[in-house]
Image (cartoon, grey):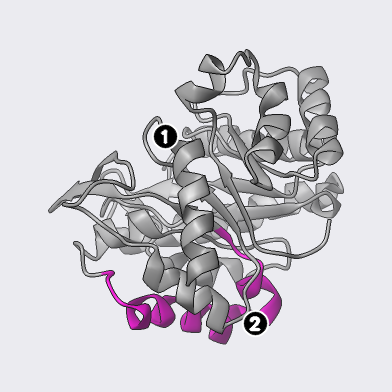
Amino acid sequence: MENKIRFGPSGNSQIFYDSGYKHSVDAPKWCKENGLSAYEYSFGRGFTMSFETAQKLGEEAQRNNILLSIHAPYYINFANESDEMAKKSFEYVRKGMEYIKVANARDYVVHLASCGKLPRQQALYLTDKRLDECLQIIYDQKLNEVGYICPETMGKFMQIGIYKEIIDFCAKDKILIPTFDFGHINCIMQGALKTSDDYKRIIDYSFEKLGEFKSKNCHIHFSKIEFTEKGEVKHLNLDDNVYGPEFEPLAKVLKDYKMTPTIICESKERMMEDAILLKDIYNKA
C-alpha cells in the first residue's frame, strides 16, 4: 500500500452494529463506505480471534484498501522482575507478529511496561534489556520481515512510555516505529498539549532521533482523555469541552511536515464517527 495519511477507528462503534454489521471482518468495508482508510483491531484482552478469521479480516482490508493494524494484549510488561513473566510478554509479541503476518497488517501496537514497585530507572533498564531479548526472538523466527512493532506512549506516570522514552527505544532497531498517543501524552503533560508548537516539540525530537521515514510514517492514536494528577482516567469523545487535546494544531503540523501517519481514533463508543471528524479537520487545516 502506498504511503499516505490514513484515518480509521480502533474497533467498532455502536453505529456499526446498528447498521446491520455483525463482525469485525465487515469493518474494512464499513470503513471504506465512510471514507476511511485504516482500521485497528485490538487484542487488548487476549488473542480471541482465530488465525483463519484474522486472514479473512486481512483479505477484506486488502480488498477495500484499508491499512490494518493490530493492538497487543495489555498484559505485556517488560519491566516485570520475573524472568518467567517476561517470557510470557515475549510470547505475546511473537504471537502478535504472527497475526500481523497472517492478516497482512503493518503495525503492531505494544504497551511496553509498567514500573510496579520498581524505581523508574530500574524499570527502564529492564524494559531496554527485555526489548533486546524480544527483538532477538522476532529476528530468529524471521518475523522482522512482516511488519513493524510500534511501542506506544502511555498516559499514566507509573507506566513506561513518556514520548522521549518511546522514541529512544524506537532508535534501537529498524522494525520499531513509535505510536504517539497524543491523548496519553496530554495526560502526562497535565493538559499542556495545546498549540502546534507543543506538538512540534514532540515530532521534532522524533525527526532528530529516528529520522524522516519513521517519523513521517509513525502510528498515531488520538482521542480526548480525562486525567488526574496520576494521569489517564478514561477516554472521551471529541465533543468533550473540558479535557484535551485538540486535533487542529496537530493537523497543521502534519501538513507542514508532509507526514503520512496512520491515525487511529480511540474515542469512547464513537471511534468511527470521530475518525471521520478527524479526517475532516485535517482536510480543512
The residue pinned by badge 1 equals: 270
The answer to whether residue 78 is visible is: no
Please say if the residues under marks 2 and 1 sit with CB atoms less than 8 Å apart: no
Q: Is residue 134 left or right of residue 244?
A: right
Q: Position of residue 5 (x, y in %)?
A: 65, 63
Which residue corresponds to the image point at 28% horizontal and 46% vertical from the top-left?
Answer: 239
Label 1: few (<14), some (14–19) or many (≥20) C-alpha neighbours in 10 Å: many
Name the residue type under label 1.
Arg
- Characterize the local packing of mark 2: few (<14), some (14-19) or many (20 or more) Cα atoms within 10 angstroms: few
The tag earlier along the polypeptide, 2 or 1, is 2
Image position of 248 with respect to 97: above or below: below
What residue range appears in magenta?
193-219
Report if residue 181 is visible in the image: yes
Furthest residue in direction bottom, as rendered: 208
Residue 73 percent location from the top left of the image: 53, 32
Indicate whether 62 appears above or below 159: above
Q: Quadrant of the N terminus?
A: bottom right
Count all numbered tags in the image, as a single digit.
2
- Residue underneath mark 2: 211
User: Is 272 inside the magenta-drawn segment?
Assistant: no
Indicate the position of residue 262 as horizontal and vertical percent values. Answer: 62, 57
Residue at image coords 61%, 74%: 215
| Amino acid type of the residue tagged 2 in the rendering | Gly
Q: Quadrant of residue 185?
A: bottom left
Residue 189, image x and y in percent? 24, 66
Q: Is residue 224 above or below residue 101?
A: below
- Foreground residue, 59 or 202? 59
Above/below status of 282 relative to 11: below
- The residue drawn where x is 53% and y is 74% is 254
Instruction: Tell me the CA gap for discs 2 and 1.
Output: 34 Å
